[in-house]
Image (cartoon, rainbow, N blue to C red):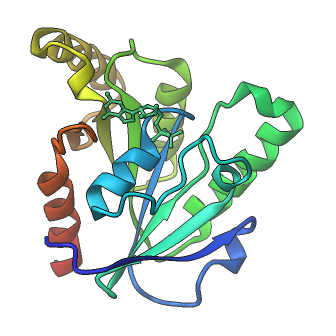
Amino acid sequence: MEILSAEFVISNAEASKCPDSNLPEYAFIGRSNVGKSSLINMLTKRKGLAMTSATPGKTMLINHFIVNDNWYLVDLPGYGYARRGKAGQEGIRTLIEDYILEREQMTNLFLLIDSRLEPQKIDMEFMEWLGENGVPFAIIFTKADKLTSGKLKDNINRYVRQLRDQWEELPPYFISSSENKLGRMDILDYIENINNS
Ligand code: GDP
């Protein structure tokens, strides 16, 4: 898929206030600092489209962007951000869960995982929750440029092994780097294929 246009539409603190539209939505989520804003900017080729985690406030909202006038890219808040405190965490969790469970237009969720890390409990639990609720999702391993290809393979295999214990069928996964645009076309083509199916 070529990106012809990508524009910010609205930020919301409530899932029920998301745009009144039937266009398909593809949501991106992950732990804070996983590289979500960088990935969104890389996918859309718009440098400042998604605000990085350095922008206070923005990262606690649901952000809708319209792409090619025919689908929404949705930037969900980062989870597991300790500095927010327990009450703040709960609020974010409710916001995320409401959106994922109630938003009928939500077509696929991309869960971002930092490829440098060992399998993280919070991500494994989140995937379990997605599975229990029948949410369609794919994994994106981010920041691949920060590892040697051997180490990258090792880390991904570790995730795959853990997932195999939990799942009959593995979710699709992509490997990305916002530094060198790795994974860009694969992710965009995946979205296009679903949109055309
Ligand atoms: P967010 O909190 O998930 O939106 O993460 P950001 O996109 O703000 O990225 C967090 C940090 O990781 C920033 O310093 C980015 O420059 C860096 N980063 C993000 N993606 C990549 C990547 O693919 N490669 C490298 N080397 N650094 C990255």
Residue 125 percent across, percent down from the top left = 54, 29
Residue 93 percent across, percent down from the top left = 71, 46
Task: Identify the image quadrant of residue 67.
Answer: bottom left
Seen as rendered, the residue at the extreme front is: 47
Residue 23, placed above or below residue 43: below
The image quadrant where one finds the N terminus is bottom left
- Please tell me which residue is depicted at 23% across the width and 77% down the height of the picture: 195
Seen as rendered, the residue at the extreme right is: 87
Q: Does residue 197 appear to the left or right of 122 in the view shown?
A: left
**Quadrant assignment for ligand 1:** top left
Q: Does residue 191 appear to the left or right of 76 in the view shown?
A: left
- Please tell me which residue is depicted at 32% across the width and 40% down the height of the picture: 139
Residue 117, placed above or below residue 56: above
Given residues 159 and 41, the one toward you in this image is 41
Residue 149, placed above or below residue 32: above
Residue 75 percent across, percent down from the top left = 51, 58
- Please tell me which residue is depicted at 80% across the width and 48% down the height of the picture: 91
- Please tell me which residue is depicted at 69% across the width and 69% down the height of the picture: 12
Residue 65, placed above or below residue 78: below
Given residues 31 and 52, the one toward you in this image is 52
Task: Identify the image quadrant of residue 117.
Answer: top left
Task: Identify the image quadrant of residue 108.
Answer: bottom left
Count of numbered circles on the image = 0
Residue 109 percent across, percent down from the top left = 41, 55
The image quadrant where one finds the C terminus is bottom left
Q: Does residue 80 appear to the left or right of 188 in the view shown?
A: right
